[in-house]
Image (tube, rainbow, N blue to C red):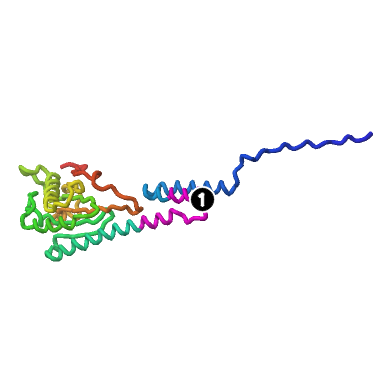
Amino acid sequence: MAKKTRHKKHEEHVDESWLVPYADILTLLLALFIVLFASSTVDQKKMEQMSQVFNEIFDSGSGVMDYAAPVESLDANSDSMYRQDQQQLEETQERVEELIALNELENQFETQMTSEGLLITIRDSVLFAPGSAEVSANYLNIAKELSQILAFDPARNVIITGHTDNIPINSPTFGSNWELSVMRAVNFLKVIVDANATLEPKYFSVRGFGEYIPIASNDTAEGRSKNRRVEVLVQPRIAEDGSALPVGESNPVTTQVPATNN
C-alpha cells in the first residue's frame, strides 16, 4: 500500500502591525524618565525650557540622544543662581562688618553665615536699658544705618528675634521674659522700617523666644549677657537646589510662643 502523505498544517500568520520598533520604545521611555526626574526637582521656568527642547525633538523627528541632556544645563543654571544669591548675602555681611568697625562695636555686634541666611546678633545692652523694650536713643543712628543695609532689590525676608536670659521678670509692663523679648523685637523692627522709606514692612517679621533658646550658660553673668540679644536674620531668596524661596506674602509679622511656660 502506498503510504499516505502527511500534509503539514499551514502556520497561522501573526499580524505584527501593532508592534512599535524597539528603538522607538526606548526613546519614549528615556524621554519619560527624564521628564519625571526633572519635574521633581526643577521649577516652572525650567520645565518650560525642557518642554521647548522636547518639542524641537519631536517636531523635527530627531532622536532624544541627538541632544544634550537638558537636566545638566538646568542644574548648572540652578547652581549659578544659588551661588549668586549667597554672594549677595556675603556682600551684605561685609557692609555690616564695616558698620561695626567704624563704630567700634566689635563686642556688641556679631555676624555669621548660617544655613538659614545671614545672622546679625546684637547684645541687648546696646539697644535697651535693663528690663526695658524701648530702643536707646544713643544707638538710634546705628539702627538707621543698618536699615540702609537691609534695603534689597529684589527684596528679601528679614526676621528680627528677641531673646532674654532666665532671670524672671514681673513688672507692670511685662509679665514674662517672653513678652519682653517679643516687644524688643517689635520695637527694633519699627525703628528699622521707619528709618528707611524704601523698606516694605511685608518683608519683615518678628519672633520672641524669651529665655528658651540660650547660646551660653545662664549660670554666669557673662553667659546671661550673651543670651540677652536681638537677632536679625536675612534670609536667602534661592534654595540650594536652585528653587525660589517664598518672599513677602508668606512672611507675615508673627510671634512665637515657646512650648514651655514659666
Q: Position of residue 122 (x, y in %)?
A: 15, 56
Q: Which residues are magenta?
A: 50-79
Against 76, residue 186 (above or below) is: above
Q: Amino acid at mark 1?
A: Ser
Q: Main secondary structure of the magenta part?
A: helix
Residue 128 in the figure: left or right of residue 202 = left
Q: Residue furthest right?
A: 1
Q: How many numbered tags mark residues here?
A: 1
Against 258, residue 226 (above or below) is: below
Quarter holding the N terminus? top right
Q: Nearer the viewer, residue 219 or 88?
A: 88
Q: Position of residue 17 (x, y in %)?
A: 63, 40
Q: Mark 1 falls on what kind of element?
A: helix
Q: Quadrant of residue 125?
A: bottom left
Quarter holding the C terminus? top left
| Residue under the image location 34 percent in, 50 percent down | 243
Is residue 153 shown to the viewer in this render?
yes
Q: Nearer the viewer, residue 62 or 234?
A: 62
Residue 45 in the figure: left or right of residue 236 = right
Residue 237 in the figure: left or right of residue 175 = right
Q: Position of residue 34 (x, y in %)?
A: 47, 49
Q: Quadrant of residue 77?
A: bottom left
Asked whether residue 68 is drawn in magenta, I would say yes
Q: Quadrant of residue 124?
A: bottom left
Is residue 206 shown to the viewer in this render?
no
Q: Read off the residue under disc 1.
A: 60
